[in-house]
Image (tube, helix red, strand yellow):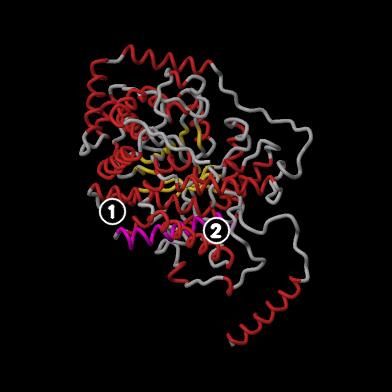
Amino acid sequence: MARTEDRGLAAALDRWRERYAASPEREGELFSTISGIDVEPLYTAESVEIESVRDLGVPGSFPFTRGVYPSMYRGRLWTMRQFAGFGTAEETNARFRYLLEHGQTGLSTAFDMPTLMGYDSDHPRSLGEVGREGVAIDSLADMETLFAGIPLGDVSTSMTINAPAAILLAYYVVVGEQQGVGRDLLRGTIQTDILKEYIAQKEYIFPPAPSMRLVTDMIEFCANEMPLWHPISISGYHIREAGSTAAQELAFTLQDGFTYVEWALERGLDVDAFAPRLSFFFNAHLDFFEEIAKYRAARRIWARELRDRYGARDERSLLMRFHAQTAGVSLTAQQPEVNIVRTAIEALAAVLGGTQSLHTNSFDEALALPTEDAVRLALRTQQVIAHETGVVNTIDPLGGAYYVEHLTNELERQAYAYFDRIAALGGMVAAIEQNFPQREIAEASFRYQQEVEAAQRVVVGVNRYQLADEQLPPILRIDPALERKQVERVQALRARRDAASVERRLGAIRDGAAGPDVNLMPLLVDAARDYVTMGEICDALRDAWGTWREQPVF
């Protein structure tokens, strides 16, 4: 019977091929994914080699291709976590409360550029940047204000910061203490992914080796004292925003993750003591099926490598739990309302790909930080997907689809090819120092831009379907007076605190940074309690470690 059906299918495919060959294809556009993977006109069982148990399994079981939990969204929806932060801590605290009142289920904090780069608001390099693209945090005092009236024992908080992440975590721990919430009860994630800063986002401070030491200090500290906290969110998002392909995002992100695992193992930690609290952060781009395949391949590769290469035995260590954010790079300043459609499609891909939490970009973010109305609409997008589309009613509904499984296998193949190339260079740190991932991303970004400028890739409103006379929507404008207010605030703090205690804390940090066997996290928590500022702590570490300057890639 099976052979008869096979012969019937083969005959049907032959007839289809003849008819398809007689039908002209559209001219001038590419039949490939955004990442450049060629796409066939039809996928069948002949198109993909798949072994159900080995490659797919079932949700909640190895290799976790179909999801990390047995019930997925039938049991619990993803966390709806909108990114927020602007001005001073007071303004962002108000935005946090607004989002929680409108149904958000987790907080996600954006910091301004001086905070990200380890400068206080009154530093000369901070001029004009304070509170512009995130909230300004100079000290524990700002952190106290940021979370005023928000019980840290009841919320999960994400903080997007990398080079000075350990300092922000120390501030958060102390705010928890003040609220009577022990560090062992704090829930959330701090990004901390310094390798992707060297690769893509460029918000680094120190050279790679001491930066990796600080990341490992955080992993060790959290493994011992903060069991509910994710000390690192290994981030492909910024790699993709820099112009990478989906395969590069997948490969470089996972290789960064393997590198953090290796450093922690070298520290003497057991893999099952820290791996369950490693998390990931991926981009949700516009190529719908490619994105879904990317997430599925990521789960499968991570589970396999943690088990087979690093010897993890606790099943929780094998779970790739990830946050997704819709692609900022896909937003257009032209006809910005069209971004609502883009974001909805990207968010749907993240959900069908099995994300654990999600941020949906606001339609006006190509123009400025989002308005409250735009943020509410972005949150409503997630709520409509969750409650009105039916996609949450069954797990991995696209699993087994020939095209999706083909893309999953192809992205996995390309990722392993990159792993081999990085290993030949001496590992990820060495590859970064040789500009390998940076160069690969630059070439991919250049290819894509050429395709857009040649109109082979259509971007609605940009290179097709333009409007001659556009009216832009109202945008959020940051009051310049907020910068003066923040500068006065940090200067007043310095004037009223115990200067001798501050100097003792900074001396201890310098000494600890100079000694390779000292975990800096307890010293940073002590400094936070005495209101030592972000800039002062980073300056002490700059004194000990120096700063990093990379060779540019053209």
| Residue 408 can be seen in this image | yes
The verdict on residue 307 being magenta is yes
Q: Amino acid at mark 2?
A: Asn
Res 125 quadrant in image? top left
Q: Is residue 492 above or below residue 444?
A: above
> Are circles 2 and 1 on residues that touch, CB within 8 Å?
no
Q: Is residue 304 left or right of residue 222?
A: right
Q: Amino acid at mark 1?
A: Val
Mark seen at residue 323: none
Circle 1 sits on which residue? 271
Disc 2 to disc 1, C-alpha distance: 35 Å
Read off the magenta span: 289-310
| Residue 189 can be seen in this image | no
Label 2 secondary element: loop
Circle 2 sits on which residue? 393
Label 1 secondary element: helix
Q: Is residue 422 above or below residue 190?
A: below
* Overall secondary structure of the magenta section: helix
Q: Position of residue 1 (x, y in %)?
A: 59, 88
Res 523 quadrant in image? top left
Counting labels gives: 2
Which numbered disc flags the more N-terminal residue, 2 or 1? 1
